[in-house]
Image (cartoon, rainbow, N blue to C red):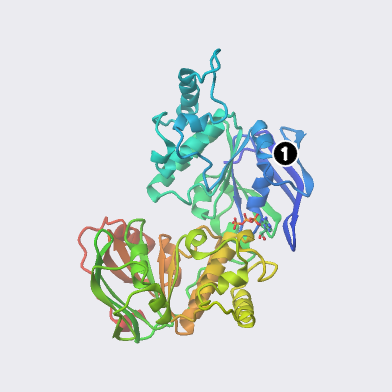
Amino acid sequence: MRNENNPVIIEMHRISKFYPGVIALDSVDFCIRKGEIHALAGKNGAGKSTLIKILGGSTQPDDGQIMLKGKEIVLHSPHDAIANGIAIISQELMLIQELSVMENILIGRLPHNAAGFVDWEAAKTVAAEPLKQLGLELDLSAPVKTLSTAQQQAVEIAKALSRHAEVIIMDEPTSSLPNREVDHLLSTVRRLRDQGITIVYITHKLKEIFAISDSITVLRDGKNIATLSTSETNQAKIVELMTGQSADSMFEKGNSSSSDIPVLEVRDISRKNAFSHISFTLYKGEILGFAGLLGSGRTEILRAIFGCDAFDSGSILIDGKEIKEFSVKEMIRRGIALAPEDRKLQGLVLSMNISDNINLATMSSAIRNMGKEKKTAIKLFDSMGVKAPSIKALVSSLSGGNQQKIVISKWLATEPKVVLLDEPTRGIDIGAKSDIYTLVEKLAGEGVSVIIVSSEFPELLRVCDRILTLHDGEINGEFLHNAVDEETLVAYASGSVAQYSVEPISKSEVK
Ligand SMILES: Nc1ncnc2c1ncn2[C@@H]1O[C@H](COP(=O)(O)OP(=O)(O)OP(=O)(O)O)[C@@H](O)[C@H]1O
């Protein structure tokens, strides 16, 4: 709980930051108290990253003032921030994979003996200290590349502690962690707070904000909308503050557009070590969800349908005709589109602009029709509500939610009849999520069929007509969206429902 008696450790006053055509931060005041976990919430593009980059010294504000324990500080570089006890743990960890745990913790600061050689014994003692503070036992000599993501994150935190960080900023720390590691990270964060360390915690996951934080600051369109004590507010209120809309209106399922016309029939496909005996039918205008955890085979099944990966047995039919030739090119020709999970690696070319990215999947010859490309880009840019100065803006400058809209636009440009969306809302804010659900419903209304893979089951319940649960490469349950709850989906997806025979659902029930 926020303790108003804790002294203020950092005050940011009237911080502004301008980029060409964008006010990233508009005279923001941000106050953090010592020993609290302060969550920073806001839609994509609200200004969270810019604010913490300023606090971490990697971006300079155009206006405003930063006070640390009552004294003004000027942060010209990340080095200045570290010297002032402020550390950032980014989503992309800054570790050197080939070096050991100890070398990473003490990077640039290994102790030397009188003869000028590294004093490895002293290094061991110094590096062990922050790990002890975190309550962790790690082999100090193990190369970092042999550790799990959660362990690597712990090394990054230990590095910050060994540099005497008093304020640790964590940017989406659970986004790359498997579910089972999340609770462990949250208890590490609480442990740090109890030792008097101040944490600024950025996440799009509201559940996490309420599980961990003492206070919440909400940014919207570059402004500080409110700073609240977590115990005195609730999720619906935070959604309202983030979006300016009531939470209820964003989470109502629209009418189903599902028909009786089969579009995609997957018959008993199997691939060794990936999935087995997968059979289902997708109908015209239907939104079908795959509820599965990491390793359930969900991504592999989509990739097989899209022709990226082969399967060992079984068959796939589109519009009643069995497909004999499997390649991405052929599947695009037959009207299938896949928006992949890792949008930065597989979905976009970050160094290219919005227009070129939208037209990527339809550029087929060396001679480009620039007029047509521009028309397509403008149409999708407008209909998707992308927040950027123009179609010429670089995709790398967009927020996560807007990047995702570009990935989806790229595939809509191919005018598909089946859209496969792999974790379409991962890491994006609630406003952009709502835009994507609305878009999916609009597509279904136009007769496009959609498969959504997600580990966020409330999202599937919100948008899908029907949901298949996947565990260990097999479909182990089939549910209508209005006949199932989150707990049941979790039980099936985690395999904790041992014996279950899938009751076939008649199409009349789906509607
Ligand atoms: N280097 C940059 N050049 C141009 N515009 C930028 C740059 N960095 C951020 N912006 C713009 O500033 C605004 C705020 O972006 P910021 O990344 O701070 O938002 P955010 O709340 O962190 O979003 P997300 O949750 O997607 O990370 C956005 O409109 C973004 O496009």
Quadrant placement of the C terminus: bottom left
Q: On the rendered structure, is 353 left or right of 347?
A: right
Location of residue 432 by image quarter: bottom right
Residue 238 is situated, as x and y percent measured from the top left of the image, at: 59, 57
Q: Quadrant of the N terminus?
A: top right
Q: Is residue 70 above or below residue 364?
A: above
Position of residue 357 relative to residue 368, above or below, is above
- Compared across the picture, whether 490 is left or right of 446 comes to left
The structure residue drawn at horizontal position 38% and vertical position 61%, both measured from the top left corner, is 486
Q: Is residue 438 visible?
A: no
Q: Position of residue 346 (x, y in %)?
A: 47, 62
- Ligand 1 quadrant assignment: bottom right
CB of mark 1 near ligand 1 (< 8 Å): no
Q: Is residue 154 above or below residue 443?
A: above
Q: Work out whether residue 267 or residue 213 is closer to the camera in this orientation and state it.
A: 267
Identified at 43% across, 83% down, the residue is 257
Extreme-top residue of the structure: 114
Name the foreground residue: 449 vs 126: 126
Give the farthest residue toward the right: 63
Lateral position of residue 333 relative to residue 500, left or right: right
Which amino acid lies under the numbered mark 1 shown in the image of this protein? Leu
Q: Is residue 104 visible?
A: yes
Query: Dot 1, crowdedness within 10 Å: few (<14), some or many (≥20)?
Result: many
Q: Is residue 369 left or right of residue 30?
A: left
Residue 458 in percent (x, y) is at: 43, 63
In the image, is residue 115 above or below residue 201?
Answer: above
Q: Residue at the spot x=64%, y=59% of the render?
A: 397
Kindly state the secondary structure of the residue where label 1 is placed.
loop
Q: Position of residue 396 (x, y in %)?
A: 61, 59
Would you name the residue on which mark 1 appears? 75
Q: Indicate the quadrant where residue 502 lies.
A: bottom left
